[in-house]
Amino acid sequence: MMEARHKVYYFRVLISSLAGLASGLIGLTSIEGLSLFLLTYFLVTPVSLRLWGNELKDTGLIKLYKEAVGSSFLAFLLVWVLVINLMGLGVSIYVVRTSSSGIYPIQTLDGRTVGPDERPFAGYNAVFLNVSNGKIKDIYVGTYAKKSYETTQLYLSNTKIKLWNNGTLLIEGSYNLSSDRDSIRIRKLFKNVTLYRNGTLILDGAKLSLGDSKSFTLGNITINVLYNSKDTIHLKLISRKDKVTEYPTSVFISLIEEKGNYIYVFDSLKPIWKTRTARVDESYLIVLPSG
C-alpha cells in the first residue's frame, strides 16, 4: 500500500502539471504562470490533510510543504513549455540551476548546457547572476565564446563584439529606433534623439537624412553612424577592454570576464526580472535550485 507521504508527492506533481497545462492553454505570462504554480503548490497541503488526515498525523507541516518541491516545479515547467510549443506560441524557456551568484551558461529544460555557438535566449547564451535565498537580486544577460589565439568574436543580441588579445575592442551593430530595447540604448548613447515623419533623424543636434553618415565624439571615443534605412542606424566604434565601465562603451557592455578557455561578455541592458524569472522579448529564463 502506498505511504501517505508518497500520495502527497504524486498529488502535488499531478496538480502542478495541471497548472502548467492551464498556463499554456490560457496563455499566461511568466509571472501569472508562476503565481498559479505557487497557489496550487501551497493549496495541496491543506487538501491532502483533508483527504488523508489520519495517515498524515505523524508528518510535520514543514515536511508536507516541502514534499516534491523540485519535481512539481519541473513538471509544471515541462507541461507548460510542451503546451506552448504545441500551440505554436513561440515562447522559449531556459534555466540556470544554481543557488549561488556567478557566471553561468544557460541550459535547456532537459539539462543540456547551451554551447558557445548558440544564442537561443533572445540572442544570448549566458547570465551573470546575483542570487540570494534562491531569488534573483540582479542579473545581466550575455554571451560566451571560446577564446581565440588573436581575435575572439561574440554577439550580444544584434551587437557584434570583437576582442583582440592586445585589449582592443570593436563594437558594431544595427539598431531600430522602433524597438524598445534598441531605443533605450540609442537614447543612452545620444542625449537628444528625434525622428521626424519625413525621415529626418536628429542625433545630438546633428541632422541626418536617409543614407547620411556622420562621426560623433562621445567621451574620448569616436562613433561612426550610418543612417542606412528608416528607423535604423548602424553604429561602429573602437574602444578598449579596460574601458567597458566608461561612457560610451558602457552603453553596450557591462562586463567582460575570462573563465577557463572562454570569454564572457555581458550586455549593459538588463532583462526584466522578478523573483526567479527573467524575460527578454518573448524568451524566459528561470533560476532553479541546484541539484
Image (cartoon, rainbow, N blue to C red):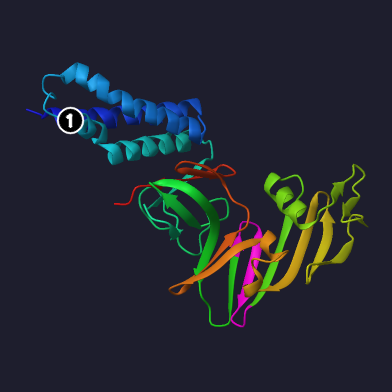
Which quadrant, please, contains the N terminus? top left
The kind of residue on which mark 1 rests is Gly
Residue at the image point whose x is 47% and y is 54% from the top: 130
Residue at the image point whose x is 80% and y is 56% from the top: 190
**Seen in the image, is 64 located left or right of residue 73?**
left
Q: Quadrant of residue 41?
A: top left
Queried whether the magenta region covers residue 159, the answer comes back as yes
**Seen in the image, is 44 located left or right of residue 51?**
right
Please name whichever residue, 14 or 223, is drawn nearer the observer in this view of the structure: 223
Please name whichever residue, 15 or 135, is drawn nearer the observer in this view of the structure: 135
> Residue 287, how many percent across, how many down?
42, 47
> Residue 106, how many percent across, how many down?
45, 55
Q: Residue furthest top?
A: 50
Q: Residue furthest left?
A: 1
> Residue 69, how many percent across, how many down?
29, 38
Picture layout, residue 54 above or below residue 234: above
How many numbered callouts?
A: 1
Q: Quadrant of residue 238?
A: bottom right
Mark 1 nearby-residue class (10 Å; few <14, some 14–19, many ≥20): few
Please name whichever residue, 56 or 142, is drawn nearer the observer in this view of the structure: 56
Residue beneath disc 1: 60
Q: Secondary structure at mark 1?
A: loop
Residue at the image point whose x is 23% and y is 35% from the top: 67
Picture layout, residue 41 above or below residue 183: above
> Residue 18, how many percent across, how many down?
35, 27
Queried whether the magenta region covers residue 190, the answer comes back as no
Q: Quadrant of residue 252?
A: bottom right
Principal SS element in the magenta part? strand
The region drawn magenta spans: 155-167
